[in-house]
Image: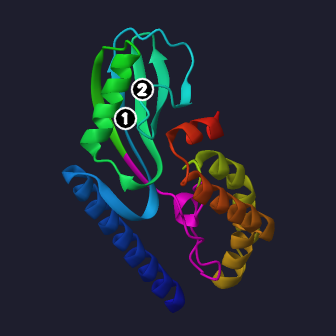
Amino acid sequence: VAPRMVYTLGHLLLALALLLTLFALVMRLRRGSVVLERPWLLAIGGTLIGSHGLTAPLLMDFTGPAHGTFLYALPLSPTELFVEETALICRNAPSWSVLESRLRDRLDGMGLTGELTVQERCVIPMDPALPDLNSAVLAFGAAAGLVHPATGYQLAACLALAEPVAERLAATMELAPQAAAMRVWDALWPSHRRRVRALRMFGARFVATLDHADQAAFFD
């Protein structure tokens, strides 16, 4: 039992440190642009109320001003549109006010002049470290390093891994905690997935070097 308590305390302290780091970053973003030591995805989004005419989502829409950011748009109804302005893998991070201004300018350029209510501010580290695969304390989702380092996506990976991880958990319930955890970690991060992750990290570093036009061409 004692080792599990030590691991749990360590993970709680790590989580607290990450939350404090994110809080400090958010406070700095409120004051202006920030030069970051690691790549992050930043996004600001909300709901636009008014007729929009969109019948399908917009995914990574780089059209409009070449600010190095792009638009996600999801029609919720004929008069509701979720929109999000995203800065991908950035080190010179724009402030929240700059991102919001870009979003409103983009919507104006598209002729979307409804009422926008900002509801979301998003900060995602884009170089997620692998978890400690020798730990007796398990993790899943972003805590397990499942964020795609070139896009910030993780939901598809989590859904794909949920069943095999659950099956491995069920099959190891009678084992000692360390032995059970090692088998579950192997379901999450087998050697072939670690190789794929290394390739994705290389891709993320490449994408980070691209300007707005080249990013648009890369993701087209």
Identify the element where label 2 is drawn: strand
Viewer-closest of 37 and 22: 37
Quadrant assignment for the C terminus: top right
- Tell me residue 75's x, y (percent): 48, 19
- Tell me residue 180's x, y (percent): 70, 77
Q: Which residue is drawn at 55% across and 54% down?
A: 209
The structure's colour scheme is rainbow
Viewer-closest of 103 and 187: 103
- Magenta-colored span: 122-148
* Classed neighbour count for the residue bearing mark 1: other residues with Cα under 10 Å, few (<14), some (14–19), many (≥20): many
Q: How many labels, in total?
A: 2
Q: Name the residue under label 2.
A: 82
73 relative to 131 in the view: left or right: left
| Main SS, magenta residues | loop
Q: Which residue is drawn at 44% across and 82% down?
A: 10
Image quadrant of residue 183? bottom right
Q: Name the residue under label 1.
A: 45
Query: Residue flagged by tag 2: what amino acid is it?
Result: Phe
Query: Residue flagged by tag 1: what amino acid is it?
Result: Gly
Viewer-closest of 91 and 209: 209
Q: Are marks 2 and 1 in contact (CB under 8 Å)?
A: yes
State the CA–CA distance, disc 2 to disc 1: 7 Å
Q: Residue at x 50, y 83 (%)?
A: 7
